[in-house]
Image (spheres, rainbow, N blue to C red):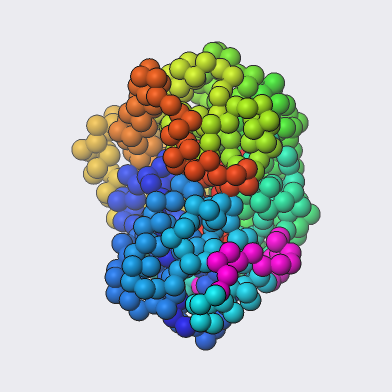
Amino acid sequence: MRALLVQSRSPTTYWSFEHALPFVEKAATYPPLGIATLAALLPTHWELRLRDLHVAPLDDADLAWADVVLVSGMLIQLESMRAVLRRARAMGRRTVVGGPAASSAPELFEQADHVFRGEAEGRLDLLVRVLEAPATDSPRLLSPQGDDRPDLRLARVPRFDLLELSRYGSHALQYSRGCPFKCEFCDIIEIFGRVPRVKSTEQVLAELDALRALGARGTLFFVDDNFVGNRRAVASLLPALRAWQERNGFPFAFCTEASIDLATHPELVTAMVGAGFGQVFVGLETPSTTALAEAGKTQNLRVPQEQAVEALTRAGLEVYAGFIVGFDSDGPDIFDRQLAFISGLPIARAMVNLLTALPGTQLWRRLEQEGRLRGAPSGDSFERPNFEPALDERTLLAGYRRLLAALYAPEAYFRRCALQLEQAPPRRGAVAHSVGNGSVGTLGRALWRLGIRGPRRRLFWRLVARALRRGTAALPRAVMFAIVGESLIRYTEEVVLPRIDASLSELDDGGDAASEHARIGDRAPARARGAAASGRRTPGARLITEEETTVR
């Protein structure tokens, strides 16, 4: 059996950092960890090829080679997935679709011969039997019986060897699935559950060994939705991670995602920094305690969020964060409150999203009962909301536009970078990865394109001067901020603001948002899974590729 595994392509988002990739000479930010994980679970006698459409287009020769084509992706990648399925079917190849979108809304994939739903570990026997048998009379919908939240000890080392690791700006590894909290807008707890499942320490170290043996170095993203969701387990893992890093000369600079209550556990923070973690994404969401309470995000109420961010920053973790506007309790003042809140934090990368009702979440079910849903989300954060907001919709969209324009005005962005540099302790080894994994070429390209030819060169050199006052170890971080800022600022100016303007024009013209959402999502049922409003991508691991949808 010759199987072609295809990772569908996402549109450009804040999280793709497309304007930053040329500086580090990479094709994509993150590898498709989920589909590489699937590859490791397929029969060893199958011949496999893996193609990531973020790296290169799909050749007809690959489709002609294959007996079966397996396609994975999220709802935001729907059109890319359908295009691959149509091409494969036109060439007479059997097709299987899986991943977040297909698992939740199989009715969206009439182009596929088979739809696999759920996680892959311990659940692939039915799929293998169907594909190795004649195509006639085989079932289309494959929903294996048994545990739909399998023990991660069944996971194998992903087939990193099928990936062109040198083409990616970061590497990826998954330790756990699930989160113990109950945020109303989050679908992670609906898909993966509220009891975090973890791999053994030995499994994690085996994956690190595999990556290192293939030459991987630099940034490595633990893609867990909440790395510290199982605090006892992670406390046991971290000393082993540190020992592995020390034995191997600290080849990786780790980053991950965690809930903000991490700051209330300084022993974990210290252990993370000691193991080589330098960045953490957190979901701050809003300065409104009323909105946090209404969304069920009680973990953010346990400590003042500003204090938590400062504590993490001073301990050595760069914080980047997600924020949301459009909660039912938000008034017209929320945009100024968010701007003041974010501007006072040492958070350069502040990802602000409109609240989105993701299918299958508590929020979706509540809005459905209230008759406020317009349809499934498309994954586009810059369209009109997929539900009737409590705040006047034009006020919401116009305020959102004003907030993003203010946050990513060059002066404002570089000011937040300076705050981070001032508060963070210089860490020579931990930040060497910040500029193209230590590449002199990346530094040279940044100096030429940003410091000499760039329209923001005055801000660039001011940030460099601030970094040097902190010591030469802070310089790579400052240059990294400038490179990332080039992507965020340009994307805001060239894509985001015009798209919100288009949504405002549609609203002014009396456009029907409900019909548009119905067109995109086919009014998928409540279990159907949408992609994040932020477009954020972290590699997941089901039949299934990349990540998830919500901001924690």
Give the magenta range: 138-159
| Residue at 52% from the left image edge and 86% from the top image edge | 45
Instruction: Please state if 481 lies on the left or on the right of 311 as rendered.
Output: left
| Residue at 58% from the left image edge and 31% from the top image edge | 373
Residue 354 percent across, percent down from the top left: 52, 30
Does 113 appear above or below 183? below
Q: Is residue 142 magenta?
A: yes
Residue 383 percent across, percent down from the top left: 43, 31
Does 510 appear above or below 376? above
| Residue at 70% from the left image edge and 61% from the top image edge | 148
Does 502 appear above or below 28? above
Residue 451 percent across, percent down from the top left: 27, 38
Residue 517 percent across, percent down from the top left: 47, 36
Foreground: 504 or 28?
Answer: 504
Name which quarter of the figure residue 235 lies in.
Answer: bottom right
Instruction: Please state if 251 lies on the left or on the right of 227 as rendered.
Output: left
Residue 218 in sight here: no
| Residue at 42% from the left image edge and 65% from the top image edge | 6
Foreground: 367 or 224?
Answer: 367
Foreground: 187 or 145?
Answer: 145
Residue 153 in sight here: yes
- Locate the C terminus by quadrant: top right
Q: Is residue 89 magenta?
A: no
Name which quarter of the figure residue 140 lies in.
Answer: bottom right
